[in-house]
Image (cartoon, rainbow, N blue to C red):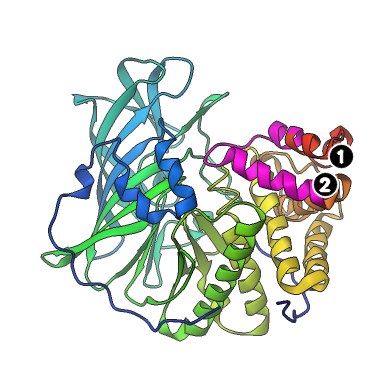
Amino acid sequence: MKRPLASFLTLSLLLLSCNFLQPTPSPPPSAPGPDPMQTPWDDRTHFKSGLVASAQSVLNGLAGASVYRIEFTIADNLYQVAGTEEVRYTNTEDVALNEIHFRLFPNILGGGMTVSNLSVNGQSAAPRFGLENSLMIVPLPAPLEANQSVVLKMDYAVTVPQAVELNYGVLAYYDDVLALAHAYPMIAVYDDEGWNAEIPPQDGDVTYADAAFHLVRVRAPKELTLVASGREISRGEEGQAQVLIVANGPARDFYLAASPKYEKISQTFGEITVNSYAPRELRDGAQFALEVAVRAIDAFSERYAPYPYTEFDIVSTPTLALGIEYPGMTAIASRLYDGNRDSRMYLESTVAHEVGHQWFYNLVGGDQLDDPWLDESLTQFVTLQYFADEYGKVGEDEFRASLEGRWARVNNEKIPIGLPVSAYRGAEYSAIVYGRGALFFLALREEMGTDAFDAFLKEYTASLSWGIAAPEYLQSLAEQKCACELDALFEEWVYP
C-alpha cells in the first residue's frame, strides 16, 4: 500500500506492521552444557540459527573465512573492557604470507587498546606497530602458504572514550550508553595492494573487512541490557555478572551496545525478528523505527536478495551521525526519536538507509575508504527506492530533490564520485558521495533501462555475496546486462 508522504523538498540528510510486543524481560539463564566457545574451528553449527533458510548454504562455503573467538569483560564503570581473542586465519591468497596485520581501531577513535600475551600456534610472538598504534603487524615463524591456516591468540584491554567527538562516537560511553564498535583486534584485508591499512579520515567509515565468523562471550554488569550483532546462543550468570554468548556470521564486524535504560519492542515476520531498543521515553520513536525497518527489509529482500539473518536490531545511541551500520543491526541517533515532524522524516530516511547497508556493506563488501561510492552512494539510491516503493512517484521525486539539494552544496560541481574519502575537502564528501553518487545510479538506470538495471542489481548482489566489490566489476556487469557500452557515463560521473 502506498502511504501519504510529508514533503521532503527541504530535507537534506546528514548521512550518510503487525503486532508490537511489550518490553520483555531477559530470558532465564540457560542450562549448563558444552561451552560454545570451545567449538571446533570448522564446526559452524552455532551460526545456523542466525541465518534464514535460504542463506544457510553459506555455512558449507567460505572455507577460508577467519573464525574469531572473542571474550569481552565489561567493568562496572562501563568504559573499561578486558578481552581475549583467539582467531584462526587461513591464507586465501596465491602468495605465501610472512606476517598478518591487525587493526587496533580504539587507538584512533579517542580511546586506547593494548595487546599482550600474543602467540602464533602456541609460540610467543613480538609484534610491530604502526599507523599511530592502530596497526599491529604479527610476524609468522614460517611463511604461511596458500590454503594453510594459523591460530593467533592474545589478551587485550580497551579504554572506551567518554565523549562522542571522534568518528561520530562509534566507540563511546556517553549518556548511559556503551557503544563498542571495532573494539577487538581485527584482521586487515589482503588485496591487490597487499595488506590494506590506513588511518581513516574523520568523515567516512573506518573499516574494510572480509566476511568472518565470530563466537563472542560477553561478561557485563547485570543491570545492562546487551544488544549484539548475531544470534544469542546462551545466557547465564557468573557471580554478579551476566554472561551472554552470541554467534555472529558470516559478517564484516562485531558490534555491541549496552545501557541500563534500554527497553525492547519486537516484531516478527516470516523468519525474521526485528528488535528496537531505546529508553522508555523514546518508545514512540523506537516503534516507528521498527516499522520502517520491517518495510525496508521486506522491500530490499524482494529487490536484491533475501535478508540473510533471522534478526535485525536497532539501538538508539548518542552518536553524532544520524545512523551507523553494523552487521545485523544499526545504531540510530537518539535525537531523532523526539517525535517532531522533521525528526520523524530524518528517522525514516536514516533507518531505511542503514537497513540498505545490510546488502551494500555487509552482504556485498567493499573498500569503504578508497571506494566509498560502492556502499554509500549505492545505499543512498537504495533509500530512494524505498521511498518509491512506499510512497510512489511522489516519494521518489521528493527524495531525489533532497539528493539534488545535497549536490547543490558544492554548486553542482562535477567532482568524480569514485574518489577515496581522503580526496574530498570540506562539504565535498557529503555532497558528492551521498548526493551526486546516488544521482549517478539514477542516470545509470535511465541509460540501461529499468528492467536491465533491476536485473543487474540482483545479479550484482548475488554474485558478490560475502565477497568484495570493485568498480570495474560493477561497470562490466552493467554493460553485460544492458548489452551496451557505458564508458562515457562512467567517465562523466565516476572516474577522475
Q: Is residue 72 above or below residue 424?
A: below
Q: Nearer the viewer, residue 365 or 411?
A: 365
- The residue singled out by tag 1 in the image is 489
Where's residue 132, x and y in %? 44, 37
Q: Nearer the viewer, residue 178 or 307?
A: 307
Q: Is residue 340 visible?
A: yes
Where's residue 33, x and y in %? 14, 54
- The tag on residue 74 is none
* Quadrant of the image containing the C terminus: top right
Where's residue 358, x and y in %? 55, 54
Q: What element does badge 2 sit on? A: helix
The disc labelled 2 sits on which kind of residue? Leu
Q: Mark 2 or mark 1, which has the lower sequence index?
A: 2
Q: Is residue 131 above or below residue 408?
A: above
Q: Residue at x 10, y 65 (%)?
A: 239
Query: What is the chief secondary structure element of the magenta stretch?
Result: helix
- The residue singled out by tag 2 in the image is 444
Q: Is residue 9 visible?
A: no
Where's residue 279, x and y in %? 41, 79
Q: What element does badge 1 sit on? A: helix
Q: Give the residues drawn in magenta, as a range.
A: 451-476
Q: Nearer the viewer, residue 73 or 311?
A: 311
Q: From mark 2 to mark 1, how far is it between C-alphas?
A: 8 Å
Contact between labelled residues 1 and 2, with CB atoms less than 8 Å apart: yes
Q: Nearer the viewer, mark 2 or mark 1?
A: 2
The disc labelled 1 sits on which kind of residue? Leu
